[in-house]
Image (spheres, rainbow, N blue to C red):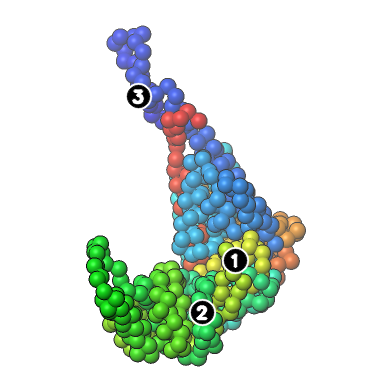
Amino acid sequence: MTPSLVGEPMSEGEGKPPVVVVSDSTNITSGTEVQEKLISASRVFSDLLKPTYGPRGLDKMLYKTDGSTAVTNDGAKIVAELMVKHPAAKMMVAMGNTQEEACGDGVTTAMMLCGALLEEANNLLSKGLHPLTLVDGYRTSMEIASQLMDADAVDVDDVRLIGVAETALTGKGAEAAIDVFAPMVRDALTAVEANVEQAGAEHIAMYKIGRGGLRDSHLIRGIAIRRRVQMDNFPNNLKNAKTAVLGGDIKIRKMTRDAEIQITSAEQLDGFVEAESARKQELAQSLIDSGAKLILAGGEIDRDILHDLADAGILTVSDLDESELDNAAAATGATVIDSIIDIEASDLGVAGNVHWERRQSTDQVEDVITIDDCKTPATVTLAIGGAGEAATEEVIRGLHDALRATSIALEEGQLLAGGGATHARIANAVRKASESEPGRARLAMEAFARAMETVPATLADNSGKDPLDAVLEMRAVAREESPTPQGVRVDGEVGELSGVWHPRAIIEEGLESSVETAMSMLRIDQVISARGD
């Protein structure tokens, strides 16, 4: 019996009002009604994302409160933009955010599985099965799933790594040029892998070319920045240029206190001007003597110093922000320094190929300075072609997912087959194990297996095929020990899969998150709302 928050009157003093613990506006929901409401809210959230799943998934148009719009089928993007109110939906959002932060992909899968687990649980709850029996069955099933993934995981090689990138890009805006982007993703990560502790998406910058098409995209083994090149006589097409990265201004420092200087003769004025000019020449000469042929600065550059550097054949770019300075230093191997006078040869990096292109001066478009062909870059850049702003943003989101997935594959070295193959195998293993379960937990294990089959069913449904036929075929092939993974292909038919791979962590993390969230909801037996809704 669920305890009440309103005290019962004692036998003495019959007729006295009960002790009220909470305000009259508080609404208390108890019993199976709680699970029904939580499960209904979660199913709405899950069903919202189902049509976006897989290579044939459709897009959602998000109309934001500020009037802007976005078109995407990325589960993480949709979850981030929704303004949810229901506590169950908030639990789903938290789960999606956790999956995105941990793996960068697999959010839609986790949402779907959680919704399917809760839907199957609701059917059993309505027949009188206790929630904790469901929790026990789900926990046992998760252990079996982990064992199955241990057995089915394969090692990463170069071909499979391309498959990981292609799988993450399929169904996204970048799919139109997937044969261009998948090798780019692999090459970008392998280019920085030897120069950083662990290659990841944070070491890959994105640059919008702003013209051409997606197939004009390419990898820059360095960085590209948009800044105005201040003088036409600056050198261009530099090769193996020594590079200095300065964090501050290149000019004479101003005094921190106000001071007045009284000049009584022309000679004094000339001496004052000459002293200032000599100081500027000293700063310029220290940069020239360093041997740098490319100077990147985070602050302003004095015009006189700028002319001296131009005369010395040194390309100088100013007003870079902190992230651009850090990326430039990482790409060239330079050290970001603040003091110009103390610059040393060890502080310099090397830019393999430096080219700048003059662009028309507008509010948005400036000159483009490209630093490419760096020998040991710790940062590289994916230059994305295409003139459409919204479309390019969606491509970048897809590439970011692919980078995260591919970097996880490189780090962990284990992959699992996609296309619903792994989830169908998990369903088969759990269903087989349930046959030796004597108690009611067997019903929960069978429900878990049916929930896993949501993945191949949705893939087939979104491809225009009958989901039931796909599930039955997947049950048949999951029982076979085929050397080639069997799953739902892009056309919705069940057959051998070629190059459809996910990092094990993405599938495992998503499954664990969905199971833990479902079990947390099933353990809730009372909802207390102070607002009365």
Mark 2 and mark 1: Cα distance apart in space = 17 Å
Identify the amino acid type marked 2. Answer: Met
Drawn side of residue 53 relative to residue 316, left or right: right
Q: Residue at x 66, y 77 (%)?
A: 216
Residue 211 in sight here: yes
Q: Secondary structure at mark 1?
A: loop
- Which comes sooner in the sequence, label 3 or label 1? 3
Q: Residue at x 44, y 24 (%)?
A: 25
Where's residue 259, x and y in %?
24, 64
The image quarter in which residue 524 lies: top left
Task: Tell me the tag on residue 21.
Answer: 3
Mark 3 and mark 2: Cα distance apart in space = 76 Å
Q: Residue at x 59, y 59 (%)?
A: 74
Where's residue 445, x and y in %?
53, 53
Q: Of all residues shown, which one is farthest toward the front? A: 265
Residue under label 2, please give it. Answer: 231
**Front disc: 3 or 2:** 2
Residue 182 in sight here: no
For label 3, count other residues whose C-alpha is less than 10 Å away and answer few (under 14), some (14-19) or many (20+): few
Residue under label 1, please give it. Answer: 362
Marks 3 and 2 close (CB-CB < 8 Å)? no
158 to 78, vertically: above or below: below
Identify the amino acid type marked 3. Answer: Val
197 to 519, vertically: above or below: below
Q: Residue at x 73, y 61 (%)?
A: 463
Which quarter of the figure is the N terminus placed in? top left
Considering depth in this image, is 89 or 345 the residue closer to the camera?
A: 345
